[in-house]
Image (cartoon, rainbow, N blue to C red):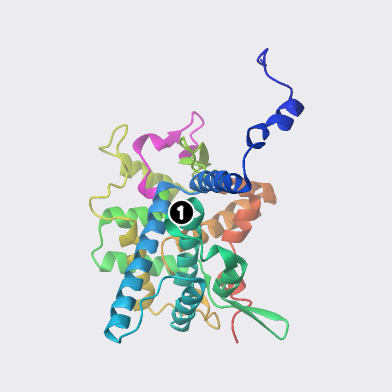
Amino acid sequence: MKAANKPRKGKVQRDVLNDVSLLSMAQIEEMARGAESELMGMTVSDGTRGLYRGRWNILQDILQELNCMRRANAMDPVEWSTALFILFMRRLAALDMGRSVAGYLNAVLFMQRSDACAYGSWATKDQEKLHRLTKGASYQGGARRHVTVRGQIDDAMFDSLLDFLIGGGHPVSLIIAMQVAFLCALRISEVIRLKHEHIIIEADGSVWLDLPNKAFKKGNGKPPRVKKPVEEIEAMTLLFDSRIGKGFGDFLFPRSSWNEKMARDTIKAWANKSNVDFPVLDNVFIDGPHCLRHGGMKRIQDRVVQAMQDVLAAEKGACSARNVQHYARENRVRAKRRRE
């Protein structure tokens, strides 16, 4: 029911800037910076904001150490600038740390846009150029060549990972969580936040997971939630076993024995120790549990989408058909444009 005193939309649009009719351009620019800062703050979660702030603090520590060495060499101290940051990115890229470069750039741009007064604006002046420098791609002879792409852990690789986890005496909770992430194509952040009540059993016997909808950015309130079906019997068994002894509000995988960082480091250790080798796929890398989601999405595509002969069945993965196609790309496809 519409409010009786609600103004007409056209009238509202004509009046929204009336309050700035007497402001100077400097005041308007200051208000615009405040509006941009507010909007930027709504685009990331608290966890991502903390990650960006940590990277910014690392940059300040680097600058402090650099200036200590410059003073020891009787040189004037410097401040972060576009020129110094480009040099920093170039040195990191030479050490094959292209992903770290992109991470620092994203952190700097976010911090500056969310609070330009506190973090300066030196990088935003050349944002497009900085992004080009950090994309990790070059153009030679008309062919685009990517430096690295994140791969997927397929069925055979996952069996190897399980052997590594069991043989290394890793926590049982971590092993089960990895299996759930793979079989259900979940993010590790979703797995570690699963609670007893998030496993929904319908009257027809189908099993669903109640998850936050990652398609929506976190604003002032909690993100909407979405139901994702559990397709495989093995996944259902693991989830039900994890619920034994737990009640409403209890996490299925408590953080007392492991956390997201341990899961990431464990997969990296497995990849390095096992010397995971993809023939002629030298630019595909395994960097953590998100590769389990890639592989799990491929399973969903193979067992659900293809079986039903309907691309709309990609919604079984609780994301769009386009996203399923992106996640489910095989490693040989991901590396199609590898460096020669």
The answer to whether residue 180 is visible is: no
Residue placed at 51% from the left, 68% from the top? 150
Tell me, yes or no, whether the highlighted magenta stretch contains residue 91: no
Farthest residue in the top direction? 4
The answer to whether residue 89 is visible is: yes
Q: Is residue 304 left or right of residue 41?
A: right
Q: Is residue 18 left or right of residue 90?
A: right
Tell me where the magenta segment starts and ends, as one range: 191-210
Residue placed at 53% from the left, 82% from the top? 279
Total number of numbered discs in the rendering: 1
SS type, badge 1:
helix
Residue placed at 41% from the left, 61% from the top? 289
Q: Quadrant of the N terminus?
A: top right
Q: For mark 1, what is the residue? A: 117
Residue 230's spot in the image, x, y percent? 49, 44
Q: What type is the residue that disc 1 sits on? A: Cys
Tell me if residue 16 comes above or below residue 173 in the rendering: above
